[in-house]
Amino acid sequence: MKNIFLTGPIQVGKTTIIRSSLSGFAGTIRGFYTQPFFPDNGQLRFVMRAVNSEDNCKQDAWICQAGKNKQYIAVTETFETTGVDLLQKALTKDTDLIIMDELGFFESEATRFQVMVKKCLVSPIPVLGVLKQKSTPFLDEIRYREDILLLSVSEQNRDHMAGLVKMKLQELFDRA
């Protein structure tokens, strides 16, 4: 196992766990975070942000937009451009750890992005990420890989999960 993914209910603290587990990490981290964003019109959107500020990412990298009945519509182009670019930089620059927060169903049609995710997973660089608790062919393929440690986060275990992730990362780097 060289890749660690967290899964669990929405808003249980998966991103917080990742950020906490990286406190004191001395290596170079690259990849992406997805974050909620409220533009001037107040309509909630989600954006893709670079983990490493050196990897300049387009500010308006929307991964979805509001559709009818408050359902979100994926912006596949963001995954195919910004997402691919950020993961390519992670593979071609001096990177110690790749963050993928989060992989979900919005990228179901983003085939170039999916290929880059898989390239990262087979690379010698460890990946730490979040995997949405949905079943799609792409997510299921990742979920059942042999090189993945999938940790389920709940309200009951989230308080000690950052320590566990930090320990697992340390084990990975000690073996390298």
Image (cartoon, helix red, strand yellow):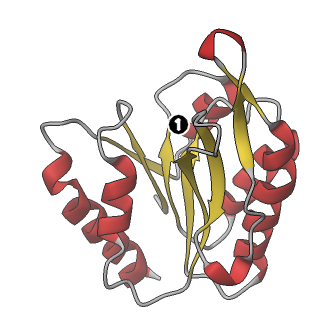
- Residue 144 in view here: no
Amino acid at circle 1? Arg
In the figure, 170 relative to 149: above or below? below
Which residue is pictured at 63% across the width and 17% down the height? 71
Furthest residue in direction front, as rendered: 40
Q: Secondary structure at mark 1?
A: helix
Percent from the top left, x then y, of residue 107? 73, 36
Which residue is pictured at 36% across the width and 73% down the height? 22
Q: Nearer the viewer, residue 54 or 176?
A: 54
Percent from the top left, x then y, of residue 141? 63, 34
Q: How many marks?
A: 1
Which residue is pictured at 71% across the width and 11% down the height? 68
Percent from the top left, x then y, of residue 3? 50, 58
Left or right: where 35 falls relative to 150: right
Quadrant in the rendering for residue 17: bottom left
In the figure, 40 relative to 169: above or below? above
Quadrant in the rendering for residue 109: top right
In the figure, 37 relative to 30: above or below? above
In the figure, 148 relative to 91: above or below? above
- Residue 41 in view here: yes
Left or right: where 44 falls relative to 138: left
Furthest residue in direction top, as rendered: 69
Percent from the top left, x then y, of residue 34? 57, 51
Which residue is pictured at 25% across the width and 61% down the height? 162
Residues packed near mark 1 inside 10 Å, few (<14), some (14 to 19) or many (20 plus) = some
Q: Nearer the viewer, residue 163 or 50?
A: 50
Left or right: where 168 falls relative to 66: left
Name the residue that disc number 1 marks.
Answer: 143
